[in-house]
Image (spheres, helix red, strand yellow):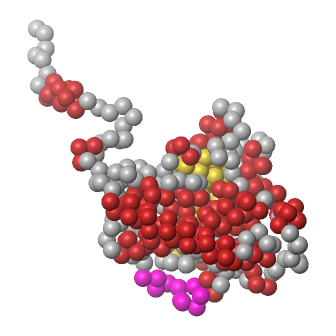
Amino acid sequence: MPTNPKTNRTGSRPTSRRAVARQLPHGLTAQQCREMYHKMVQIRHFEDHAAEAYAQAKVGGFLHLYIGEEAVAVGAIAAAREDDHILGHYRDHGYALARGCDVQACMAELFGRETGICHGRGGSMHLADAKRHFWGGHAIVGSHIPIGAGMAYAMQYLEEPLVVLDFFGDGATGNGIFHEGLNMAALWNLPVVFICENNLYGMGATLAEESPVSDMMIKAEGYTMPAVQCDGMDVLSVYGAVQQAAEHCRSGKGPFFVEALTYRFRGHSMADPELYRDKEEVRRWRELDPIPRFGDFLVQHRISSQQELAQVNEEAEAEMLEAVRFADASPWPDPSTAARGVYANPIDPEAAQEALTLAADPAPAAS
């Protein structure tokens, strides 16, 4: 388990914000740090309101919350370029917001409305935004791991200096498709960063029940792939690990594996009674909450004041209240458009019916 940040303070306070900027880790600026804090707070408030909407039956299907894991998405995506490609699993709201997707469109998507980021057709587990190179959440565990390898192959083939960030949970590493994806990425030297969010549980199965090894990075080393483990409750630790990984991939050295040790504060989904873990365990991990932890860092290094952090929280709450109002007021998709987006070149229904008729009643054969 990661160490308590309260026992791991850094040095004495600097005398000015300008002095701080030169001392920040990984080449970060004070403004970048403030932006990362804002993103984490934004995700937390979004998830809180999504949970409330689900309880009010405004969100259909399942709802998997990212509360507790915000530092992983924010730190990793902040270390990527805007034109790098992002793939995530079904706990995907955090990636969408960390990537800069529109908050109102994301909330409307959860509500199944036409104004949603996928016009109400994806829902909670399938947020995507092609303009931001965010290729969505994927509900089938591990299914997007070889997709990430394929996208990285395309980048290599096109000789574009881009990297793919492929996020998945520890539970996905037991799937055969995980090994197929890593094997091909290593064999073809592909520019993909595999990011495993090890939150200790695969649905309700503990890590010990789902894997013979506790460190997921060991599985990557079996494919001669460089791997590092970082503190997934510390946004700076994640940023540094993914920055190192992305530089490795972009330089043509092949794939890289990052294991982020993290924890979800809520159940697997909103339907989860959480009978497999005790409240004391959750309480201990909540002491490592990545948001106040990073907030303490910002105040200690005089990047932000407590008043400024409080203002970020107030603005995020107001933003989410407006997002919920927007989603509530948005129209439902027109049922006549249900087939839109299924095919790149939609089938003409009249032509299809004519073809079926001809197939059922063929012309008589020539004598």
Task: Using the image, determine if residue 352 lies above or below residue 90.
Answer: above
Q: In the displayed image of the protein, which residue is found farthest to the top?
A: 367
Depth check, front residue: 177 or 109:
109
Q: Is residue 243 left or right of residue 151?
A: right
Give the image quarter of residue 301: bottom right
Indicate the position of residue 241 as horizontal and vertical percent values: 75, 61
Q: Is residue 326 left or right of residue 308?
A: left
The vertical placement of 121 against 346, above or below, is: below
Q: Is residue 344 magenta?
A: no
Q: Is residue 206 visible?
A: yes
Pick the quarter of the image with the C terminus. top left
Q: Is residue 160 left or right of residue 122?
A: right
User: In the displayed structure, would residue 94 be above or below residue 275?
Assistant: above
Point out the image quarter for the N terminus. Answer: bottom right
280 within the magenta span: yes
Front residue of 49/270: it is: 49
Q: Residue at (14%, 21%) from the top-left corner? A: 362
Q: Which residues are magenta?
A: 273-283
Q: Position of residue 245 (x, y in %)?
A: 75, 54
The residue lying at 29 percent from left, 32 percent from top is 347
| Residue at the image position 59 percent from the left and 88 percent from the top | 283
* Residue at the extreme bottom: 280
Query: Can residue 149 be seen at all in this image of the molecule?
Result: no
Occupied quadrant, residue 296: bottom right
Residue sitting at x 70%, y 67% = 235
Image height of 205 relative to 183, above or below: below
The front one of 221 and 153 is 153
Q: Residue 272 at x, y = what percent?
A: 42, 78
